[in-house]
Image (cartoon, rainbow, N blue to C red):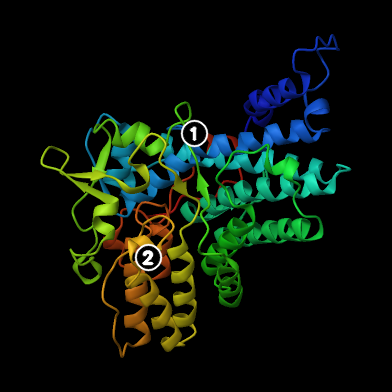
């Protein structure tokens, strides 16, 4: 990945340096790199780490907006309202209409690689700090965003950069997931050796439960990588009564609400059954439908709701239901159908009041017997409903072997900016 990293990181470094400087006049050599002061202090490193969350979540250019939007379009969850939104319209059309000029996929590529680069700087320099309890918090927090960035690259592209810098090579997307898992392992080792200090935790945005999020992301990417034992163990380690969220305020708005829900001018939900084919459509009495979809008499008829309903609506880093469905899928793929059905029914019967986020189907339990294939289809169905518009559906479609006709792309082409500057860029996928 060739990227003007120093230029793109400058604002974060400057902000972190100002945190250190306060109002004190400091007439130092202006040619001295900002890194010298930013990356040598806990406060400076914290400023850069908090910047990772901003790059990931803030505005239409964020990884969060781009990943959710791209996934929603190519898996038929949403439809275009205004064709003048060129990038979204190309994703709506799918196929060859999505090329390396698309600003959504180019933005996701660039922000993901930037996050990985900056997170590496935080992690490397945190390891040099004398306060190991503060350092472990920095390492764990930065690792969450690095893992999410690696996960997004591995979800949407067949190959991912094997590092940052000029003319880097590429590795398979499977190795991208393995890289994320290895980073999480290191972060977990750091906080197990030295508990995160209250001083660190009080200086980062509220919302993210670091320990549970590391377990949850390890479970997610272990499942995607096919390591079922590790996925099960990590999912079991997550406290399902706790929330882990990206939080927003009047200045930093929920990016989907800001661009989509509040305007009615970009995209909306495609239909009343989440765009799913008949075999996996939700029952109309499923209580998750009104949670995720606002049905109205005016256009658009099916409006984005759920985690994108308001200016400051929290977006989950993961849902408890995802962890339960990971367990169900692991059991099913190992042909332990009895335990798979037990876990699956925990999601099917869950009432909204019994979920930390209010996501509940409230349906009667499924009754077997089921073959392995039938049970896997039911798990896929519940993932598509439970995790609606959370950026995971394209990966699910491929993993569960759904027909290409149900989606508009399998993988994305590489942005032209990458291809024009890196001779190691792989060929674009056919579909």
Q: How many marks?
A: 2
Q: Secondary structure at mark 2?
A: helix
Residue at the extreme bottom: 369
Closer to the camera, 298 or 112? 298
Residue 58: image tag: 1
Q: Dot 2 surroundings within 10 Å: few (below 14), some, or many (20 or more)?
A: many
Residue under the image location 32 percent in, 43 percent down: 91
Residue under the image location 31 percent in, 91 percent down: 369
Q: Which residue is mark 2?
A: 383
Q: Dot 1 surroundings within 10 Å: few (below 14), some, or many (20 or more)?
A: some
Residue 274 visible in this rendered orientation of the protein: no
Residue 116 percent location from the top left of the image: 64, 44
Residue 90 location, quadrant? top left
Seen in the picture, residue 51 relative to 400 is either above or below; the reply is above
Residue 212 percent location from the top left of the image: 60, 59
Residue 352 visible in this rendered orientation of the protein: yes
Q: Secondary structure at mark 1?
A: loop
**Relative side of 363 to 357, left or right:** left
> Which sits earlier in the primary sequence, circle 1 or circle 2?
1
The answer to whether marks 1 and 2 mark residues whose Cβ atoms lie closer than 8 Å is no
């Amino acid at each position: 990945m060739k990227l003007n990293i120093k230029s793109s990181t400058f604002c974060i470094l400057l902000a972190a340096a100002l945190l250190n400087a306060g109002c004190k006049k400091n007439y130092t050599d202006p040619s001295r790199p900002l890194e010298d002061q930013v990356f040598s202090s806990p406060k400076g490193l914290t400023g850069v780490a908090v910047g990772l969350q901003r790059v990931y979540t803030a505005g239409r250019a964020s990884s969060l907006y781009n990943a959710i939007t791209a996934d929603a379009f190519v898996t038929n969850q949403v439809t275009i309202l205004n064709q003048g939104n060129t990038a979204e319209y190309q994703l709506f059309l799918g196929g060859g209409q999505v090329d390396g000029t698309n600003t959504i996929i180019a933005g996701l590529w660039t922000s993901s690689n930037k996050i990985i680069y900056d997170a590496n700087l935080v992690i490397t320099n945190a390891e040099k700090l004398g306060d190991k309890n503060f350092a472990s918090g920095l390492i764990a927090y930065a690792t969450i965003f690095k893992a999410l960035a690696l996960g997004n690259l591995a979800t949407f592209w067949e190959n991912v950069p094997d590092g940052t810098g000029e003319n880097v090579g590429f590795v398979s997307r499977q190795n991208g997931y393995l890289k994320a898992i290895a980073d999480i392992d290191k972060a977990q080792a750091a906080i197990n050796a030295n508990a995160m200090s209250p001083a660190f935790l009080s200086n980062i945005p509220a919302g993210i439960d670091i320990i549970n999020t590391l377990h949850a992301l390890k479970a997610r990417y272990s499942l995607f990588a096919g390591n079922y034992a590790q996925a099960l163990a990590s999912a079991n380690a997550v406290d399902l009564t706790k929330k882990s969220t990206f939080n927003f305020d009047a200045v930093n708005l929920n990016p989907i609400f800001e661009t989509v829900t509040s305007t009615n001018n970009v995209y909306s939900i495609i239909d009343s059954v989440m765009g799913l084919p008949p075999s996996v459509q939700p029952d109309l009495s499923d209580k998750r439908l009104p949670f995720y979809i606002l049905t109205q008499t005016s256009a658009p008829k099916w409006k984005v709701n759920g985690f994108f309903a308001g200016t400051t609506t929290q977006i989950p880093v993961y849902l408890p239901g995802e962890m339960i469905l990971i367990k169900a899928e692991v059991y099913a793929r190992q042909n332990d159908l009895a335990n798979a059905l037990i876990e699956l029914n925990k999601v099917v019967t869950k009432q909204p009041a019994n979920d930390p986020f209010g996501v509940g189907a409230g349906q009667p339990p499924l009754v077997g017997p089921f073959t392995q294939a039938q049970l896997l289809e039911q798990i896929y169905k519940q993932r598509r409903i439970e995790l609606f518009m959370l950026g995971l559906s394209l990966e699910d479609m491929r993993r569960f072997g759904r027909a290409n006709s149900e989606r508009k792309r399998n993988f994305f082409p590489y942005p032209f900016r990458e291809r024009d500057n890196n001779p190691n860029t792989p060929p674009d996928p056919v579909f």
